[in-house]
Structures are given as structure tokens and as C-alpha cells.
Image: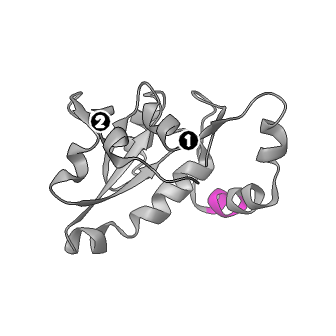
Amino acid sequence: MSSVNLTSLGANHVKNTTSGEMVEIGSLWREQTVVLFFLRRFGCQVCRWMAAEVSKLEKDLKANGVDLIGIGPEETGVKEFKDGGFFKGDIYIDEKKQCYNDLGFKRYNALNVIPAAMGKSVREIASKSGKTISKSSFLGELFLQEL
């Protein structure tokens, strides 16, 4: 990953899933330290498991003045994600996917999504997540790829 321009990234707007308010993402870290956790898709079983795993740190983060913030690329599946209690922090939507672009996230296509989904590391995480995350959904953004 190349260096990130925090000024440019911080100027992007994200939507608070609780209030519906649009805020500059930089305002989330301007007054305090935050951990930003980017999700590929709210319905993704692996994303849900990873969100639950990182949420185990929330109590210790909060005790040290650090907020845990989740960012998703679209609203599809966010209600079920929140209702499922997969993530302990506030959740925002990057409707224009500008943060994802600025951070260098790539997109899968029809040719590379299947091999990536069948990769060893994804299979291992899917196996772990299947033991604790019983429900997933294929609704929404299927082709957003992590860094």
C-alpha cells in the first residue's frame, strides 16, 4: 500500500447510519484517536466475523480514549448487520466509495472474484466464521476488494 494522504481522505463525506447526518470523515479523528474498520460488504460472513473479532477490542480501546468506527460502502445490509450486533462501534457509509478509492481498494470482476473467494486464507476465515456467524447475505456490493 502506498502512503495515504490524510488531508484528502479526511475531506471525504460519510453518512452516520444512526442519525443520517453526513460528516467529513476527518472530523471523526480530529478530536480523538480512532480505529477505522473498513468492511467490504455488510452481509459478508467473513466481514461479519472480522467485525465481531475487532469488536472484542472495543472495551479496551474505549478505556484508552480510542473510538472504534466501521465504514461500509453502501447501506444494503446495514440494518441486519447492526441488528446482529456484529460490530461494537459507530457505523458510517461511504456512499461515493471515495474513501475506498483514496485508500487503494480495488474491485473484483467476474474473472477474478471466484479464485479470490476460493483462496486459502478466505477459506480458513470462512471456516472459522461459520462456527460463530450463522447468517450471511449476498445482497449488495460483491466486487469490492480489500487492499
Alpha carbon separation for disc pair 1 and 2? 21 Å
Report the disc number at residue 55.
none
User: Where in the figure is residue 40, as x and y percent of width and height?
Assistant: 56, 41
Task: Assign the N terminus to one quadrant of the image.
Answer: bottom right
Query: In the picture provided, is 80 more to the left or to the right than 112?
Result: left
Residue at screen point 43% across, 53% down: 37
Considering only order in the chain, which callout, 2 or 1, is on the residue closer to the N terminus? 2
User: Which quadrant holds residue 125?
Assistant: bottom right
Residue 126 is one of the magenta-drawn residues? no
Query: In the picture provided, is 113 more to the left or to the right than 31?
Result: right
Q: 131 or 141: nearer the eye?
A: 141
Compared with 91, 2 (above or below) is below
Magenta stretch: helix, strand or loop mostly: helix
Question: Magenta residues, as a range?
Answer: 127-131
Q: How many marks?
A: 2
Residue at screen point 80% across, 27% down: 110
The residue wearing badge 2 is: 11
User: Where in the figure is residue 35, as x and y percent of width and height?
Assistant: 35, 59
Q: Amino acid at mark 2?
A: Ala
> Which structural element holds mark 2?
loop
Residue at screen point 58% across, 45% down: 135
Residue 134 in sight: no
Compared with 97, 67 (above or below) is below
Residue 47 in sight: yes
Residue at screen point 19% across, 68% down: 65
Q: 43 or 4: nearer the eye?
A: 4
> Which structural element holds mark 1?
loop
Compared with 68, 79 (above or below) is above
1 vs 2, front mark = 2
Report the disc number at residue 40.
1
